Image (cartoon, grey):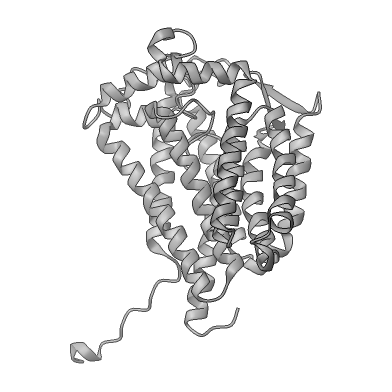
Amino acid sequence: MLPAFDTPRRMPAEVDLTLLWSALFLLLIGMVMVYSASIAIAEAGRFTGNHPAYFLVRHGVFLTIGLVAAGFAFQVPLTTWQQLAPWLFVAGFLLLALVLIPGVGRDVNGARRWLSLGVANLQPSELMKLFAVLYAADYTVRKMAHMHELKRAFLPMAGAMVAVGILLLKEPDFGAFVVIITLAIGILFLGGMRARLFAILIVVLALAFAVLIIVSPYRRDRIFGFMDPWSDAFGRGYQLSHALIAFGRGELLGVGLGASVEKLFYLPEAHTDFLLAVIAEELGFTGVVVVIVLFGLLVQRAFAIGRQAVALERLYPALVAQGIGIWLGIQGFINMGVNMGLLPTKGLTLPLMSFGGSGIFVNCVALAILLRVDWENRQLMRGAKL
C-alpha cells in the first residue's frame, strides 16, 4: 500500500460548489414552499381546474426549462456574452416597449407587464435585469479610461437607464426600475467611478425616487400603509399586516410545513411576492434564517468570483459576476424587507424561490453565467487556454 503522502490529491472542483449548492437549495426550498403556499388558491380557482398541484406543476415546468437554458448558457464564453450585450440590451428595450402597446401587452391587477406566449406569459422586465448587467459591464469596460468624467462615462449610461426607467414606470413596475438602476450604478462604481461623483449620484437618485413617490397617489398610499399598516389593516395596510401576522405566528420553529393559516386567502400573493411570510409562518425564524444565509452565501461567492477574475485581469467577467451578485442581493433584500415590514411594498419576487416563469428562467440563466465566469477562472489558473 502506498504511504499516505504518496496518495494522489483529489482534483479541485470545476466550479464553486458553495455557490452551486446554495443556489440548488434555494430552488428546492422555493419549489416546496410554492406548493405549500399555493394549494388553497389552486383548489379554489376555476382557471386552475381546482387542482391543488396546479402551481407546483407549472413551477416545476418553468424550473426545468430554466435549468435546460442554464445548461446552454453555461456553454457560452464570456467573450460571446460581451459581444452580444449591446444587442441584448436593445432587444430588452424593444420588448419593454412592446408590452405597452394596447392589445399586445397583457394587463394583470392593473399593471401591464406581460406578453402572452399562449401557454405562459413573458415578463420583459425580468429579462432586462440580466441584459442590464451584461450591458453595464460591457459599457464600463469600454469607458474604463474615462470613468472619472461625468460627461463621457456617466451621462450616456444615465440616458439609457432613464429610457428604460420611463418604460418600466409606464407599466408600472417601480420595483424592477429600482433594481435595474441600482445594479447599473453599482457596476459603474465597481468599475472605477469616482467616489465623489457616486455620492452625488446617490443623492440625486434619492431625490428622484422621492419625487416619483410624491407625484404618484398609489405609491404614496404604499408608503403610508408601510409606516402604519394597522391604521388601515383592511385597506392599504392589508398585505403588510397579514405578512406580519404570519411572522408572529411562526415564532422560532414555525407552525409546521403546510399548516399556514395566512395562505388561506388572507395573505395576497402568498406564492409570489409574500412567499417569505409563508416560510416564516410554517418554518419559523429558523427557516427565514436559513434562506437569508443561503442568499448571503450566494452573493458572497459572486463577489469572490468577481475578485478572482480581477486578479486574472478579466474585467468584463468580473463585473458580470459582481453585477449578478448585486442584482440577486438587492432584489432578495427588498423582497425580504417588504415581507418583514422594513420596506414599502414593491411587487418584487424572491429570486430563485417565488412562483413565476420569467423570473425563474432568468435567474437560472444568470447563475449559469456566474458559474461560467468561475469555470473560466479555474481553467486559466490551471494554465489552460480559453
Q: Residue at x 42, y 19 (%)?
A: 227
Nearer to us in this view, 177 or 85: 177
257 sits left or right of 187 in the view: left
Q: Residue at x 66, y 36 (%)?
A: 123
**Place of residue 360 in the rendered image (x, y in percent of width and height, measured from the top left):** 54, 42
Nearer to us in this view, 108 or 87: 87
Residue 242 seen in the figure: yes
Above or below 10: residue 40: above
Above or below 267: residue 274: below
Above or below 1: residue 335: above
Q: How many marks?
A: 0
**Place of residue 38 in the rendered image (x, y in percent of width and height, measured from the top left):** 45, 25
| Rendered image quadrant of residue 16 | bottom left
Q: Quadrant of the C terminus?
A: bottom right
Nearer to us in this view, 40 or 141: 141
Q: Residue at x 40, y 71 (%)?
A: 13
126 sits left or right of 253 in the view: right
Residue 117 seen in the figure: no
**Place of residue 372 in the rendered image (x, y in percent of width and height, measured from the top left):** 54, 65
Above or below 20: residue 312: below
15 sits left or right of 120 in the view: left
Q: Quadrant of the N terminus?
A: bottom left
**Place of residue 139 in the rendered image (x, y in percent of width and height, measured from the top left):** 69, 59
